[in-house]
Image: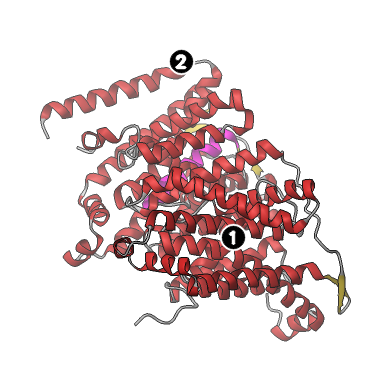
Amino acid sequence: MSARRVVVYWTAFSVILALLIVAPLVLPEFWRRFLTEILIWGLLAMSSDILIGYVGMVSFGHSAFFGLGMYGAAAALLLVKPPDLWLAILYGLIAAAGVAAFVAYFATRLRDIYFAITTLIFSQIFYVIIFTWTEVTGGENGLTFSRPALAIPGLFSVPFTSETLHWFVLAVVTASYLALRRITQSPFGMVLQSIRENEARTRAIGYPIERYKIAAVMLSGLFAGLAGVLYAIQNRFAAPDFVFFLISGEVVIFNVIGGIGTLVGPIVGAAFFLLLREGFSRFFTEYYLIPVGLIFIAMVIFMPQGLLGFMRRWLNQ
Amino acid sequence: MGIPLEQLLQAIPLEQLLIQTVNGIVTGMILALVASGLTLIFGIMDVVNFAHGELFMLGAYVGVITLAATGNFWVALIVATLTIALLGAAIYVTTLRPLLGRDPLTTILATFGISLVLQNYALWQFGPVARKIQEPFTGHFTLFYLDYPWYRLVIALLSAAIIGALWLFLKFGTYGIWIRATTQDRVMAQAMGIPVPSVLTVVFAIGAGLAAASGVLFGPLVGVNHAMGLDWVLKAFIVVVVGGMGNLGGSIAASIFIGLLESYASLWVSPAQAVIVSFVVLILTLLFRPTGLFVPTPK
């Protein structure tokens, strides 16, 4: 790749990041919250893109990782007094990683459609457990808790405002993006992409593809769990609805709309979807999924590359 | 925990066990009818139809409307089947045919989009309140201490009859042979003069019609509402995987197996938790026999 394209890429990256940093200072409260939410859903979609875009496995079970991240954070915030931000993240990641290990072990034995269906059914298992285990999870009502303070132990501790929350989420999402980008360009990421291109040949060369797939699902689950923790911190509740497979479906929609295999595409897809929902729900109230669904079908047929698909090579340089 | 098995079994009287067996077979047969449509579409077209549950639900709604207009359950059953079969054909031609030759995963995405649209359309059109389909006859017979409705047995028999007819059609009917030829080799079938695009459309229509028929038949047992398809499509997916993808006989066996297991499980736990039993069956199947429980061991 040429040096000039690198400069253009990082300039664009810095400009967008700068805009996102300044945004909460100029936006009204509603849109500030909306932007933070886009970033969180974008992180979830980005985690799923690791599987869809780089390994070629469509997961319909990301709601399980996301939801377990939420409930893990909830456990930390409810059980440990005073609530601690970093402990919430740790618990959420452990919960999501545990579930991801379980799902990865079984689901990676299958390919294509079978993988998709298996992940979907796994997420439903966790949904039923969380929905019916009322004593621990609060059942249908979910759990509510208070938001922890933004703190670095020994240095400072301040309560979150909507601006600092936005910056915190932005920092986590940016760091995740850079980490995932680095991972997809590493030798490990190259093996994942070669599994996508030709699984039999990758196996023949001598890579233990089962282990690579398990690692990919766990990595993806970990970042999905992180998104769940952020969502729990933003909204101060955890509910079984977020484990239900419709969330997984929306994540796949974000990916397809935004463009798979680009990492930023899914964030753009999430933004596009949430804006469409916001726009259409003014006219169609709760039936906004009718026009959104039609747009989605049209994009699957006529624009399989998604909004950012045309920039795929450039973004992965 | 720690309760010996004999004690657990003693706590359940034999009559209750037999009642659950009948219940399990009845739900198993309905499940088989739903799953046979799904497995037909999958086995022949490589399309995983995520919208199958919505076709089931819309079938039930068309049944509700026709029943209200004509007052005859059987007319409603036939009208619903035909209407949804036509809708299925329209869906196939507009959204799935353009995806022919692309990655089969794109069909999951497209049908998922369809299911969102149909489900929200039903919510918009019919509202969130569940509708009721009146069963065509209300007779009961005595099963131990229970008044067991005849209608449940009739559903099981009717499902078996519909599936049997489908099997005969596929085995001996001219068009059935066309369908099987298309499954085996699409290009060769085309070369022999079989109109493959129409065959695929018709298969999708038949699958949709089967979903609608099961929706109407099952409507009287539960309420008809916009989200009723979700549960069924998940169960049908489990059945289709456990039975061996695209294998009609296997999915019927798996349906009855899962139906029985869930109704026995509901002796001990709530029906919502009994679902987990079928999830566990699925996981074990994937671990030990990923090609399906009810297919011969691949050589």
Image coordinates for residue A129, horizontal then vertical, percent: 62, 58
Secondary element under disc 1, as helix, strand or loop, is helix
Most foreground residue, A212 or B165:
B165
Report whether B192 appears left or right of A240: left
Report whether B162 appears left or right of A10: right
Q: CA distance from mark 1 to mark 2?
A: 57 Å
Report whether A260 appears left or right of B280: left
Chain bearing tag 1 is: B
Residue at horizontal 86 percent and vertical 79 percent from the top: B144
- Quadrant where the image shows the N terminus of chain B: bottom right
Chain bearing tag 2 is: A
Secondary element under disc 2, as helix, strand or loop, is helix
Residue at horizontal 53 percent and vertical 40 percent from the top: A84
The segment highlighted magenta reads A219-236
Q: Quadrant of residue A77?
A: top right
Residue at the limit of the structure toward the left, as seen here: A2
- Magenta stretch: includes residue B268: no
Most foreground residue, B265 or A229:
B265
Dot 1 amino acid type? Leu
**Discs 1 and 2 carry the same chain letter:** no
Task: Using the rendered image of the protein, determine whether residue B38 is visible from the camera's viewpoint.
Answer: yes
The residue carrying mark 1 is B210
In this picture the colour scheme is secondary structure
- Quadrant where the image shows the C terminus of chain B: bottom left
Most foreground residue, A170 or B231:
B231
Image coordinates for residue B78, horizontal then vertical, percent: 67, 56
Dot 2 amino acid type? Leu
Question: Pointer 1: residues within 10 angstroms few (<14), some, or many (20+)?
Answer: many
Q: Which mark is residue A25?
A: 2
Question: Pointer 2: residues within 10 angstroms few (<14), some, or many (20+)?
Answer: few
